[in-house]
Amino acid sequence: MLEDSYKFQQFERDCDETKGWINEKLKVATDDSYLDPTNLNGKVQKHQNFEQELNANKSRIDEVLESGIELKESGHVQSERIQLKLDEINDLWQDLIKSAEKKGMRLAEASQQQQYNRGNEDLELWLSEVEGQLLSEDYGKDLTSVQNLQKKHALLEADVGAHQDRIDGIRISSEQFVNAGHFDAENIKTKYDALDGRYGNLMKPMSNRKVRLMDSLAVQQLFRDVEDEEAWIREKEPIINSTNRGRDLIGVQNLIKKHQASMSEINNHEPRIDAVSRTAQNMVEDGHFASDDIKNRLSTLHDHWNQLKEKANQRKQDLDDSLQAHQYFADASEAESWMKEKEP
């Protein structure tokens, strides 16, 4: 009887110690440290050591349970209390094992999510860079700079297109997390939706910038053409502005021939001026972003062109007047000579 009492007390003490140990381990197994991604690898390693500790202590739990079963099977007077203790220890142990397994799964999920988040963060940084480039209001200052910007934009378009696979990969991963019942599934899906939305929102400004650069190229080509025409006008001005009206009849006749050639050049060049003007006018009518600048440059070109034609016409008139004068002087000189010949 005393021995049975001693064995029961020993069993009860072992149960209390075991219960205390399990409850301490349950605190570790049920904490939510996996929610904090800080030093996650260290936490995974720590949990692996924790699981090894549980496995190492399984024999200890088994010994306590087996001792209780033996007491009960021996017909101990405290069999009912023994069974309650056995059930309590067994339930606690099963809770501990399940909690440890669950935490292990949560840590694994957290590790996977951390990798997923890193991929997301890389894409978010890339998106920020692209969004910044698309906000640029630099559309080039001349033909060469616009062409360089177009090349840069073409590379950007290719880069955006190439990132579709990465976006798809993030989508697949997020769906897998959701379908697997990941503890942070809602947040994962929200992050993907935001990322996918930002990626989709690149398309319109990217298209707009492409069109704007094409418009910029067109206007720079126009400005180059306008400058070419201005240069042509400047080249003709010294000839048209000449004050040389000839010193004699032959000199004037030679100047008139040269001026007629200049007038022909001007007349033959007018279709080129008209073509540039039509291009400029069409761009203004289409609502080009540089319409005001186009109108100003076109107006200046027309002013210079009209001045050149007016000066050319004035020089023609001056040379015609000079021709008449020299013809008069020549005729007068000839008449004077004739009269002198007829004098007695």
Image: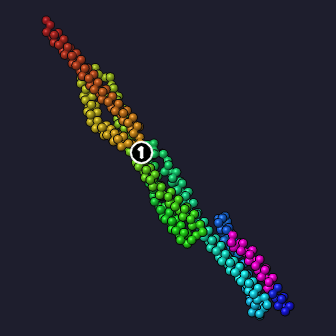
Residue 339 percent coordinates (x, y): 16, 10
Can residue 265 be seen here? The reply is: no
Residue 4 appears left or right of 324 = right
Q: Closest to the observer: 54 or 274? A: 54
Residue 258 percent coordinates (x, y): 27, 29
Residue 309 percent coordinates (x, y): 30, 29
Magenta span: chief secondary structure: helix
Q: Amino acid at mark 1?
A: Ser
Asked if residue 35 lies in the magenta stretch, the reply is: no
Residue 297 percent coordinates (x, y): 39, 35
Q: Closest to the observer: 293 or 62? A: 62
What stretch of residues is rendered in magenta? 10-31
Q: Closest to the observer: 147 or 62? A: 62
Residue 215 appears left or right of 85 = left
Q: Is residue 171 above or below residue 247?
A: below
Determine the residue positioned at 39% across, 34% down: 296
Determine the residue positioned at 68% across, 80% down: 94
